[in-house]
């Protein structure tokens, strides 16, 4: 009797379990992977990039090389970002799902004029995570979103969606997630950099057909919630010497006859008292020699290498002075540890002369596989 009663109780509980009855099948939604935002004449244009995850799941083994996974692009307009998306939602054949968005791509106009709207949109949408990537572009947003990968792999295998794996072994400028950007956006000092994307149509081809590959060309600079301008990769070359994420930095010297890889550079920033803060910068690193076509002496290579690093830092400081922004973020040291000595406006008065002293110490090691 007890067994029968137990079976009845357990069976009755099954009807109260929700299970997965309300779950949607994979093919019954439109999974958005990136959003592009433009702004002109008082109106937002919102682009959505969606991928067919069913097709992506089938791309295993040899089949991945046979047929490209299609990229779906939607476009809507509205007075604000949400209204533009709502208009799109009313026209789709399958419901839009925002929980898989990895990237937000902004036009220069949006970065100049509408960052407040972008921040509010991301903050209010519960499905948008703070670890999304943030990029900008001066080019056609749709062209960036439809850029290609190699071997017909889906767009998930491009720098738009996976910048970390593509840059970790060849660092050039920082690519930060949105949580890092927003954590510093409202600070009284320092700058934020939104990497800019363009489409390279010349460097790669498959079966003689040119590939359209999204690449980083520089960055859009903001400081104290204001847009400061655009800087190309050369202008930003000094950033890598102060980044903790720069673990391998390739450099060429003597008209590319010598190649080295700088490993794990260590940096020290010292604040010097005066009528306004000045800074002493010390860079220490090991360099592995990987190419030396003309057997140039290590001492000569060392001097040229240290000179090149100094020039890259000074070049970035010149750009900082030009756009009135602290690209190297050295003023953060004075703000955090010496705020009693200067007011914020004095700390923010950065120019080339602010970097009073640069010391670079490089230890060169021969690659054990290098043949003389």
Image (tube, helix red, strand yellow):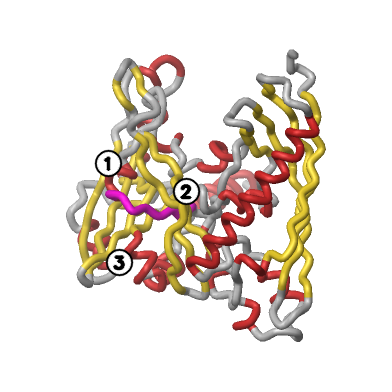
Start-end of magenta stretch:
133-140
CB within 8 Å, label 3 to label 1: no
Which comes sooner in the sequence, label 3 or label 1?
1
Q: CA distance from mark 2 to mark 3?
A: 32 Å
**Res 82 label:** 3
Quadrant of the rendered image containing residue 198: top left
Q: CA distance from mark 3 to mark 1?
A: 20 Å
Quadrant of the rendered image containing residue 77: bottom left
* The C terminus lies in quadrant: top right
Q: CA distance from mark 1 to mark 2?
A: 32 Å
Q: Identify which residue is drawn at 28% across, 58% down.
A: 46
Residue 134 is covered by the magenta coloring? yes
**291 shown above or below 360:** above
Q: Position of residue 327 (x, y in %)?
A: 57, 62
Q: Which residue is identified by label 1?
A: 72
Which comes sooner in the sequence, label 2 or label 3?
2
Q: Which residue is identified by label 2?
A: 19
Q: Identify which residue is drawn at 71% across, 75% down.
A: 277
Q: Residues within 10 Å of mark 2 (few under 14, many from 20)?
A: few
Q: Nearer the viewer, residue 25 or 31?
A: 31
Residue 287 is covered by the magenta coloring? no
Q: Nearer the viewer, residue 364 or 64?
A: 364
Q: Residues within 10 Å of mark 1 (few under 14, many from 20)?
A: some
Q: Identify which residue is drawn at 29% across, 21% down.
A: 209
Q: Would you say residue 308 is visible in this rendering? A: yes
Mark in the foreground, 2 or 3 = 3
Q: Position of residue 266 (x, y in %)?
A: 77, 50
Disc 3, SS: helix
Q: Position of residue 231 (x, y in %)?
A: 46, 56
Q: Position of residue 86 (x, y in %)?
A: 25, 63
């Amino acid at each position: 009797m007890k067994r029968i009663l137990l079976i009845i109780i357990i069976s009755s509980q099954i009807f109260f379990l929700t299970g997965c009855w309300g779950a949607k099948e994979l093919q019954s939604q439109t999974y958005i992977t990136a959003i592009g935002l433009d702004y002109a004449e008082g109106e937002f244009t919102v682009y959505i990039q969606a991928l067919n995850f069913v097709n992506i799941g089938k791309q295993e083994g040899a089949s991945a090389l046979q047929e490209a996974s299609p990229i779906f692009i939607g476009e809507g307009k509205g007075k604000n970002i949400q209204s533009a998306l709502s208009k799109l939602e009313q026209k789709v054949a399958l419901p839009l799902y925002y929980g898989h968005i990895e990237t937000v791509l902004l036009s220069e106009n949006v970065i100049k004029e509408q960052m407040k709207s972008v921040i509010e949109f991301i903050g209010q949408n519960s499905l948008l995570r703070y670890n999304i990537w943030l990029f900008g572009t001066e080019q056609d947003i749709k062209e960036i979103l439809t850029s290609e990968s190699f071997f017909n792999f889906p767009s998930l295998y491009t720098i738009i969606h996976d910048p970390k794996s593509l840059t970790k072994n060849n660092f050039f400028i920082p690519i930060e997630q949105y949580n890092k950007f927003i954590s510093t956006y409202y600070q009284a000092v320092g700058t934020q950099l939104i990497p800019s994307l363009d489409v390279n149509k010349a460097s790669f081809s498959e079966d003689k057909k040119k590939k359209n590959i999204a690449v980083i060309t520089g960055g859009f600079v903001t400081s104290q919630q204001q847009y400061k301008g655009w800087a190309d990769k050369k202008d930003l070359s000094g950033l890598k010497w102060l980044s903790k994420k720069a673990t391998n930095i390739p450099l060429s010297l003597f008209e590319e006859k010598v190649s080295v890889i700088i490993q794990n550079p260590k940096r020290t920033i010292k604040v010097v008292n005066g009528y306004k803060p000045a800074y002493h910068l010390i860079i220490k690193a090991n360099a592995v020699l990987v190419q030396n076509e003309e057997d140039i002496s290590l001492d000569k290579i060392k001097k040229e290498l240290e000179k090149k690093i100094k020039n890259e830092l000074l070049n970035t400081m010149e750009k900082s002075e030009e756009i009135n922004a602290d690209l190297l973020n050295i003023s953060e040291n004075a703000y955090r540890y010496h705020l009693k000595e200067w007011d914020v406006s004095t700390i923010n008065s950065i120019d080339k002369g602010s970097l009073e002293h640069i010391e670079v110490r490089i230890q060169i090691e021969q690659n054990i596989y290098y043949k003389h």
